[in-house]
Image (tube, rainbow, N blue to C red):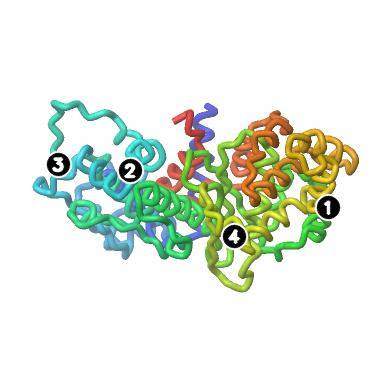
Amino acid sequence: MQSQYDELSSDLKEYEVLKSHRPSQINAATLEDLPAALISARIALDLSQAELARRTGLKEQQIQRYEATNYESATLTRLSEIAKALGVRVAETVFLPQARLDRRSFLDRLSTSGISVDWLTSRLLPPELSTPVDEGEQTVEGTDPSVARSISIVERVFGWDADRLMGVDALKLPREAASLARFKVPAHAEGKKLSAYVVYAHYLAMVIANASRDLPLKELDCKPASFLSAMKKTGKNLDLAGVVDYLWDVGVPVIPLNDSGAFHGACWRVSGRNVIVVKQRSLFESRWLFDLLHEYFHSCQSAGESTFAWIEDADLTSTRRVSAEEQAANRFAADVLLGEKAEVLVAECVDLANGNVSYLKRAVVEIASRHDVSQAHLANYLAYRLSLQKINWWGAAGNLQHRENDPYVIVRDVFFKRFDFARLDEVDRQLLRRALTPSENL
C-alpha cells in the first residue's frame, strides 16, 4: 500500500509541476518513451482529455483508455495523429545499421574526449549500458535502446548529437558555456578530464538553478560582520549544516559532489541565480565549511551580472593562489569562522611559537582557547597562510581537526530537504540523483 501511495503521490506532484511550470521540451529518447511524452505534453499544454478527443475526432473514453494503458493498443499512425492534434513536434533519430554505434563503439567514441568510461557508466549513462558486453555478443548496431537513451543524455550535457557521435571529428567540449575558456584549463589528458567534469557540473548547476525559481533572491552579505549578523538573526548555528541551510534561505542552492580529482569547488550564476558546488574528499567538517564560505564569497562577485562563473582547480597554480580574488575569498571565510580576527590570531600563533614551525601546533591550541575560537578553523587558516610561503603544514593542521559526522552527508541531506526533484523530468531527475550518490556506492 505504501509503495502505491508513494507512486500516486509522485505522479500527482509531477502533474502539478507540468501544469505550473510548462517545459519547453519533453524527452523521448526511444519510441517506447513516446506515449508517456505525449501524455505529459497534454498536461503541460493544459489540455483536457475531452478537448484532445474533440481535436482527434475520438471519444473521450478512448483517450482515457489510451492514457490509462500508456497507448498500449495505439498504432504508430494513431500516435502521430495525437502528436499532430497536440501541436507538438517529435524529433526522433533513426539509427541505421550501417551507423555501427553499438555499446562498445559508443563508449570508445566518448573516451576519445578524455572522459573516463567508468565515470560515464556510473554517473551519466543509463545503468543498463554498464552491463558488460560479452566478446561473443552480437549487437545489432543502432537498435540498442540503452545507446539511444545514452545519446539523448550526452547531447543534453555535452551538446554532442547523434551525427557528431557517429562521426570521426574530435568531440569538442562547449568551453564557453561552462566558462572553461576563462580559466585556461590545460589541453593534456588530465586537462580534458577536468574540462569534461566541469561541463557536467555546470549542467547540474543549470538544472538546479532552473528548478529553483521559487527560491527568494536575496541580496548577499559579503562582509564578515554583516554575514554573521544575518546568520545570527536566523538562529542557525555557525556550522556546516547551519551555513548550508542559510545559503538556501537566501536563494543560493548548494550541491555536494564527491568524485575524486577535477576541482575543489565552483560557483555558477544562471539567469541571476547562484549555485555553489562543493567538492572535497576531506572528512573534516571544518575544511568543507571553509571552502563553502570561500565559494559563497565568489558568488558575491559581479553582482550586477546575470551570469558568472568561478572554478577552483584541484591543483591551483601559484598565480591563482595569490590572486586578489582568491585571497579575498579566503580572508572572508577565515574572518567569518574566526570572529573577524583571522590575521591577528595567526600573528599571535607565530609569536607564541617564536617563529618555529615545530611549536605552531601547541600555539594554535593555546591561542584558540584564549580567544574562544575553533582550533580546527584556526589551524586550517594558518596552514593556508603558510602554504603561501611554500611551507606545507596541512598534515599538522589535520591533527587538530575533529571527525564526527560525514560533511558530504551533511550537505547532501540539506539538499534533499530543500530541493524539489518533482520539478525535473525523469532524465534530469536521475542524473541529479546519481550525482548525489556517494562514489563508493556506485
Q: Give the class, few, some or many, for how many residues have Cα within 10 Å of label 4's Cα (few <14, many ≥20).
A: many
Q: Marks 1 and 3, Cα distance to the nearest angstrom?
A: 67 Å
What residue sits 74% from the left and 40% below the top?
379
Relative side of 38 to 178, left or right: left
Q: Marks 1 and 2, Cα distance to the nearest angstrom?
A: 68 Å
Q: Give the class, few, some or many, for how many residues have Cα within 10 Å of label 3's Cα (few <14, many ≥20).
A: some
Of the numbered discs 2 and 4, the one sitting upstream in the chain is 2
Q: Marks 4 and 3, Cα distance to the nearest angstrom?
A: 42 Å
Q: Marks 2 and 4, Cα distance to the nearest angstrom?
A: 39 Å
Q: Identify which amino acid the numbered label 2 is placed on.
A: Asn
Q: Which residue is mark 1?
A: 344
Of the numbered discs 1 and 3, the one sitting upstream in the chain is 3
Mark 2 touching mark 4, by CB under 8 A? no
Residue 221 locus on image (x, y percent): 74, 62
Q: Identify which amino acid the numbered label 3 is placed on.
A: Glu
Q: Identify which amino acid the numbered label 4 is placed on.
A: Asn
Depth check, front residue: 110 or 45: 110
Disc assigned to residue 141:
3
Q: Marks 1 and 4, Cα distance to the nearest angstrom?
A: 32 Å
Mark 4 touching mark 3, by CB under 8 A? no
Between circles 1 and 2, the one closer to the viewer is 1
Q: Give the class, few, some or many, for how many residues have Cα within 10 Å of label 1's Cα (few <14, many ≥20).
A: few
Between circles 1 and 3, the one closer to the viewer is 1
Q: Give the class, few, some or many, for how many residues have Cα within 10 Å of label 2's Cα (few <14, many ≥20).
A: some
Q: Identify which amino acid the numbered label 1 is placed on.
A: Val
Disc assigned to residue 274:
4
Depth check, front residue: 328 or 46: 328
Of the numbered discs 1 and 2, the one sitting upstream in the chain is 2
Between circles 2 and 4, the one closer to the viewer is 4
Of the numbered discs 4 and 3, the one sitting upstream in the chain is 3
Q: Which residue is mark 2?
A: 70
Q: Quadrant of the C terminus?
A: top left
